[in-house]
Each structure stands twice: as structure tokens, then as C-alpha cells.
Image: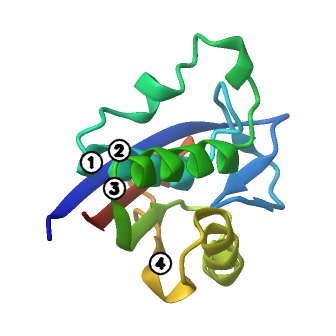
């Protein structure tokens, strides 16, 4: 059995006039994340971790922001397609450990819904998904509420 680990990172700016999507769910907030797609930082970090673990480059390679078909796309579609790429290459997911850093909104109340949504999209058990939320204690761009960042580590097996 081959075991591989992948790490993903994503960041998007918070701006007015956009919906806030994190972990596949919409969160009520006065600002949303700016991006070519729905800018779901958590899903993007997970996709990068999965693709990196399988040595399949990154999300931008497979789903470029220069392609019009990905304009405003629901990131759950990108995650579903990423899982399909992994399965076609003979991999299965062991687990995900992810952290989201945002000053506001408070994300902890939304984590159960995120886990449920991600488990459905990825066709895995909720117990294989760990999501944590933190702040940066008002430091840096996240502390100033200029953006949100997500980190993800995954284990895959072949």
C-alpha cells in the first residue's frame, strides 16, 4: 500500500457585494470572498492538498481562472471533479485535517454543516474530515478582516 500526504493553502480577499461560501455552505456575512469561482477557500485548499498528494499539480492547473467555464463556478463541482481524478488514478482518501483563519464571521457554529456537505460531495465519512476555525488575534490581513485563509492536510492511499 502506498500512503501519501498533501498540503493545501488558499487565501481570498473579503469584499462587499459577494456571497461568502466556505466549506460548501453559504454563510451570512456583510462581505464575501473575491475570486474567479465562488472563492471557497476551504474547498480550494482541500483540492490543492489532494492534488499535491497524488502528484497531480494544483487546482489552478486543472481548473484555470483563465477558462470562462469556471467563472463563478460552485467550488463543490471542482472538489467532486478532483475526487474523480484521484479515484481514476487509484487513490482513496484517508482523512482531511483543515484550519480556516478568519477574524469574522465566527465559523465554529458552521463546522458541522461544512463537514456534512463535504462528506456528501466527496463521498466519504464525516469522521474522516476535521475542520478547525481560528482567528489571527487581529494580526495581519486576516486580523484586519481583509481576507480569509485556509490550510488543509490530507492523507491518501493507493
Which of the two labelled residues, at mark 3 and mark 1, occupies the earlier sequence position?
A: 1
Q: How far apart in space, not on screen, are marks 2 and 1 (Cα)?
A: 5 Å
131 relative position to 1: left or right: right
> Image quadrant of residue 156?
bottom left
Q: Picture coordinates of residue 147 (x, y %)?
A: 55, 43
Query: Depth-wise, is mark 3 or mark 1 nearer the camera?
Result: 3
- The residue labelled by disc 3 is 90
Q: How far apart in space, not on screen, are marks 1 and 4 (Cα)?
A: 18 Å
Q: Is residue 105 above or below residue 82?
A: below
Q: Is residue 80 above or below residue 72?
A: below
Q: How far apart in space, not on screen, are marks 4 and 2 (Cα)?
A: 17 Å
Q: Picture coordinates of residue 76 (x, y %)?
A: 67, 51
Q: Which mark is residue 6?
A: none
- The residue labelled by disc 4 is 129
Residue 5 visible in image: yes
Q: How far apart in space, not on screen, are marks 2 and 3 (Cα)?
A: 13 Å
Q: Is residue 30 above or below residue 122?
A: above
- Label 4 crowd (10 A; few <14 / some 14-19 / many >=20): some
Q: Picture coordinates of residue 154 (x, y %)?
A: 32, 64
Q: Quadrant of the C terminus?
A: bottom left
- The residue labelled by disc 1 is 54
Q: Secondary structure at mark 2?
A: helix
- The residue labelled by disc 2 is 51
Figure label count: 4
Amino acid at each position: 500500500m502506498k500512503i501519501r500526504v498533501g498540503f493545501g493553502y488558499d487565501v481570498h480577499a473579503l469584499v462587499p457585494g459577494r456571497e461568502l461560501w466556505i466549506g460548501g455552505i453559504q454563510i451570512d456575512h456583510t462581505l464575501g470572498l473575491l475570486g474567479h469561482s465562488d472563492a471557497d477557500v476551504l474547498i480550494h485548499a482541500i483540492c490543492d492538498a489532494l492534488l499535491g498528494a497524488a502528484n497531480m499539480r494544483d487546482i489552478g492547473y486543472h481548473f484555470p481562472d483563465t477558462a470562462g467555464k469556471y467563472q463563478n463556478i460552485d467550488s463543490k463541482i471542482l472538489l467532486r471533479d478532483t475526487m474523480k481524478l484521484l479515484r481514476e488514478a487509484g487513490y482513496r482518501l484517508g482523512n482531511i485535517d483543515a484550519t480556516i483563519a478568519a477574524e469574522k464571521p465566527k465559523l465554529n457554529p458552521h463546522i458541522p454543516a461544512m463537514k456534512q456537505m463535504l462528506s456528501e460531495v466527496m463521498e466519504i465519512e464525516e469522521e474522516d474530515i476535521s475542520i478547525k476555525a481560528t482567528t489571527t488575534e487581529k494580526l495581519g490581513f486576516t486580523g484586519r478582516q481583509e481576507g480569509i485563509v485556509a490550510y488543509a492536510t490530507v492523507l491518501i492511499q493507493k
